[in-house]
Amino acid sequence: MTLIAEPKSMHFEPPLPLRSGATVRGYDLAYETYGSLNADRSNAVLVCHALNASHHVAGVYAGQDRSEGWWDTMIGPGKPVDTDRFFVIGVNNLGSCFGSTGPMHLNPDTGRVYGADFPVVTVEDWVDAQARLLDGLGIEQLAAVMGGSLGGMQALSWTLQYPQRVRHAAVIASAPNLTAENIAFNEVARRAIVTDPDFHGGHFYQHGVVPQRGLRIARMIGHITYLSDDVMNERFGRQLRSGLDFRYTTQDIEFQIESYLRYQGDKFSEYFDANTYLLITRALDYFDPASRHDGSLSKALAAATARFLLVSFTTDWRFSPHRSREIVKALLDNHRTCSYAEIDAPHGHDAFLLEDPRYLSVVRAWFDRIAAEFGR
């Protein structure tokens, strides 16, 4: 059975206070829902997205080919997160470029496009905005919140900001904060964007241009970190597009991996907003719940009351299994219920998006237990 997705939007006029001290008012959040809310509204699952994803989590759009949601392997009728049993909500984060209010939209206070003036947002701000969306949907408590990568950080933050509103949390291929190496990758990508001559200090909209060169490089850097060395060697190795002729120029593409990265960069630069990229990578950098507790993750997670599932992948060097085990230890220090699966998969960080039967079986079994709580 094909799941048909329908984009929706909810408007919020009251100001949303942000951790930076700024506020955003008159904003919209794009979202989609799948399945049906049960009578006592106890079967809602919130899915939080990663850097370049959106509210289009599952299903396809009517009449559109190749429009599958980014986690369609995970969510839908009969899938691990079964929409015949759960009411699943995907929401696009504030500051993104896929329908929710962000740098490309008008600031209601000035009547001009925000551009670089869109305020800094954090993971905690996104969670606050998501909580308002749930209020608008009449959902007081989530059966579960889940996400991978940056989405996993949001799921973790939900259990700390609104512990009474979350019964379960799935944190997949994520971390309690970024390592210095991860922050460094983000900074190099941001420098590529802001030094693009077409960036114009973030107000490139007014000039009718897009800093595509910077976006291409940012995506190429990011994409390298999402794949494992094994996958790149298996898929591309040292393959040449044609014979080696030693006539290289700065624009030539000789190796297949070069062709692949340029293709990914070109595609990304056509649909993603440069200011959004800067905002989201900064939110990644800032996230660190332990920083408010003298660096102790155990103290930070003492506020959580949810039951947890954590999943990591052996070849994910950007969000390594060690980082998930840090969260597991902190939860066990607080005597919280926690399941942990470490999947031996070759795909690197992108493994959380792929159709690995062992991984999907773990998630399916966990959600089966949640469904049993409300007799489904």
Image: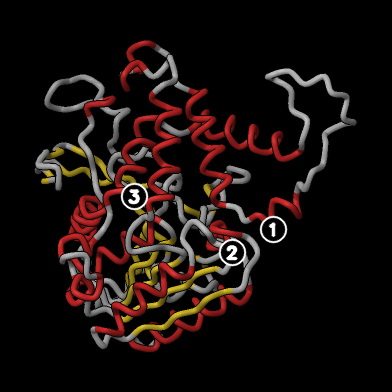
Disc 2 marks a residue whose amino acid type is: Thr
Q: For the residue labelled by badge 2, is the local secondary structure a helix, a strand or a loop?
A: loop
Residue 53: percent from the left, percent from the top? 45, 48
Q: Could you tell which of marks 2 and 3 lies nearer the N-terminus?
A: 3
Give the quarter of the figure containing the C terminus: bottom left
Badge 1 vs badge 2, beta-carbon distance below 8 Å: yes
Per the model, the C-alpha gap separating discs 3 and 1 is 26 Å
Q: Could you tell which of marks 3 and 1 lies nearer the N-terminus?
A: 1
Residue at label 3? 284
Residue at label 1? 230
Q: Could you tell which of marks 1 and 2 lies nearer the N-terminus?
A: 1
In the image, 163 versus 179, the foreground residue is 179
The residue depicted at 9 percent of the width and 42 percent of the height is 21
Disc 3 marks a residue whose amino acid type is: Leu
Residue at label 2? 315
Q: Is the residue 12 above or below the residue 357 in the image?
A: above
Within 10 Å of the Cα at label 3, are there few (<14), some (14-19), or many (20+) other Cα atoms? many
Q: For the residue labelled by badge 3, is the local secondary structure a helix, a strand or a loop?
A: helix
The residue depicted at 27 percent of the width and 49 percent of the height is 286
